[in-house]
Amino acid sequence: MNLEFSEDQKFVQQTARDYLSEHAGLDVCRAVLESDQPYAADLWKGVAEMGWLGAVIPEEHGGAGLGYLELVLIAQEIGRSLAPIPFSSSVYLATEAILLYGSDEQKNRYLPRLASGEAIGCFALAEGPGELDLAGTSVSLADGKLTGTKLPVLDGDIAHFAVVLAKDGSGLSLAIVDLEGAGVTRTTIESFDPSRSQAKIEFAGAAAEVLGEAGQGLVAADRVLDRAAVLMGFEQVGGAQRALELTKDFTMGRYAFGRPVASFQALKHRMADMFAANQIAESHGYYAAWALSNDNEELPMAACGVRVAASEAFRLAGEETVQMHGGVGFTWEYDCQLFYRRARLLGLALGSADEWREKLVQRIQDAA
């Protein structure tokens, strides 16, 4: 198995890094966090023009027709920059759901708009705080109408449509609903990371259409989440790597007793732990990216591995970045908080690391 990316794929990554370095510095993330704007609209437009939103969308639907190996590298750079845009919701989740389960008519209607950035999609699963209990979904779909509440929905306040898991007769189905139509009420809720907005969405007889096969929503949602876990895992790895780089640079430039504090053994050990966690997460990511790009049967296991490893790596990086910046790490003026906030948000966006550990154990038992 060749785990090295091709020169063309590395070029895609370098192009993404160069573009985001110029247009998505940490000041852009901070500007969204400190204002009422829900996301960086200009950056979103630029990312769309770069073709990233349609990276895996076929050319006949307006996409770039690249592959998942290119997309994971773009996701890694999105994570490094902490780009305050609905990339994960629209690309990893909504687009994937339609690519996997959309009818020809649904693909023709949604994919070109997703690729161009004209439409933003989101994925509505959770119905309250706590563990993500898909089997206990209470939002219902009957006669083409959705009723119930989803909370929290990442980017739900800015999305144009949502893919919703809902009760449908005796089973569960995925449904597409226009969030700008009648019967939909959206309320922006307070987020731990205000640079990525979240919403409460209430459906009161909102018109919806089934995505995929009726009654197979639980299987479909799990499959979409597995694929999104790989893509988000690379975003988390990118954020964790950038946090380590900033921490190393800061501690190399801060002196105590006539020497850089980075030279002290205690800090060396902690940065070594960060580095090791990042390497473990990236290794899981490479394996999962291979499985995703080949739609391999090992993808469900690999997705659990990268989800847990990447969530833990970014969590550790977020915490240690604050700690090793010393007193200033806790201040509003420094950017440490941006990484800590994003690490916490992404660590729960698809279900917690503990939930994915349990999922891995269950899958191992089922395969035995």
Image (cartoon, grey):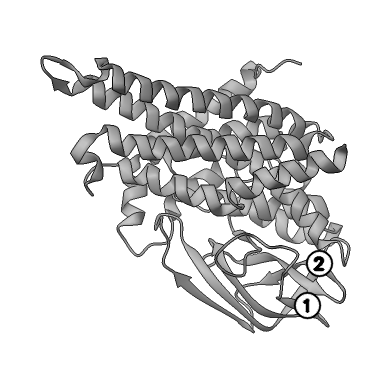
Looking at numbered disc 2 in the image, what kind of residue is underneath it? Answer: Ser
Residue 158: x percent and y percent?
A: 52, 65
Q: Quadrant of residue 255?
A: top left
Return the residue nearer the eye: 368 or 258: 368
First in sequence: mark 1 vs mark 2: 1
From the top left corner, tell me how far across and down residue 265 is, in percent.
Answer: 29, 16
Question: Label 2 belongs to which residue?
Answer: 173
Q: Quadrant of residue 275?
A: top left
Residue found at x 24% / y 45%: 330
Q: 16 or 188, which is in the foreground? A: 188
Q: In the image, which disc is placed on residue 141?
A: 1
**Measured along the vertical axis of the image, is residue 17 above or below residue 182?**
above
Q: Specify the amino acid type for callout 1.
A: Leu
| C-alpha span from label 1 to label 2 | 8 Å
- Circles 1, 2 touching at the beta carbon (< 8 Å): yes
Counting every numbered tag in the picture gives 2
Residue 206 numbered tag: none
